[in-house]
């Protein structure tokens, strides 16, 4: 459990814990809202507006039912019963992954909590639970400067590998970051 004085008015008590199937609906809602806010102006508005939290909740429920058996772990950040954000990690999916490399698949927050330390605590949990010296990678949209800055502050650096991802019918450039 973590409490921050600078967040006292907005977040009473931040708790980070492993996610379970019961969290699927709340994770999906945060996932969609975060995408709609973070990627506005990067991904087409039509695509962002089409994101369906109920559809995403079904996928999250299926994923969380498997638990860590597939090597993927998801943590949530909450304030009381209110879900503020989540992060998922698992084995790197890159062909050139280093032995034992972990990939940060996602880290998303309720937009109203951006800048209040929630993502920092989620990332600290991910790094701590994965092992401080475990090699880690992640992919980030090149146009998402806010996220790129956040990852650099946590020891991730671009390694020069880029790819294009089809998102909403557009080919968008992603950059790989690595740590450790």
Image: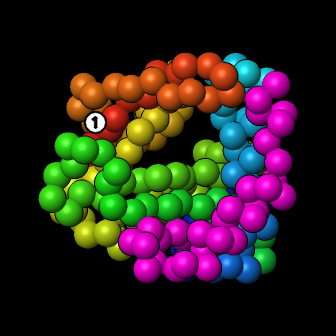
Q: Quadrant of the N terminus?
A: bottom right
Q: Position of residue 9 (x, y in %)?
A: 76, 61
Whether residue 67 is in magenta: the answer is: yes
Task: Name the residue nearer the viewer: 11 or 19.
Answer: 19
Residue 94, image x and y in percent? 30, 45
Write the residue at 54% across / 70% down: 75
Q: Which region is colored magenta?
A: 46-75
Q: Quadrant of residue 166?
A: top right
Q: Report the residue marked by disc 1.
A: 157
Q: What kind of secondary structure does the magenta stretch mostly adopt? A: helix
**Residue 128 percent across, percent down from the top left:** 33, 70
Q: Position of residue 105 (x, y in %)?
A: 47, 52
For residue 155, what is the image quadrant?
A: top left
Does residue 65 belong to the magenta stretch? yes
Q: Residue at x 60, y 74 (%)?
A: 64
Is 172 on the left-hand or right-hand side of 95? right
Can you say whether 130 is above or below 95 in the image?
below
Q: Is residue 77 left or right of residue 174?
A: right
């Amino acid at each position: 459990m973590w409490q921050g004085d600078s967040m006292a008015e907005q977040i009473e008590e931040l708790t980070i814990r492993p996610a379970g199937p019961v969290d699927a609906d709340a994770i999906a809602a945060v996932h969609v809202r975060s995408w709609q806010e973070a990627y506005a102006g990067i991904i087409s508005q039509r695509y962002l507006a089409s994101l369906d939290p109920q559809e995403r909740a079904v996928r999250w429920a299926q994923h969380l039912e498997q638990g860590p058996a597939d090597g993927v772990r998801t943590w949530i950040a909450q304030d009381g019963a209110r879900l503020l954000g989540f992060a998922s990690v698992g084995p790197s999916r890159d062909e050139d992954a280093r032995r034992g490399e972990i990939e940060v698949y996602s880290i998303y927050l309720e937009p109203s909590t951006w800048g209040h330390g929630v993502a920092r605590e989620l990332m600290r949990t991910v790094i701590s639970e994965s092992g401080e010296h475990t090699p880690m990678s992640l992919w980030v949209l090149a146009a998402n400067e806010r996220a790129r800055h956040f990852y650099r502050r946590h020891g991730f650096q671009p390694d020069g590998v880029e790819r294009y991802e089809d998102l909403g019918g557009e080919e968008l450039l992603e950059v790989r970051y690595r740590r450790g």
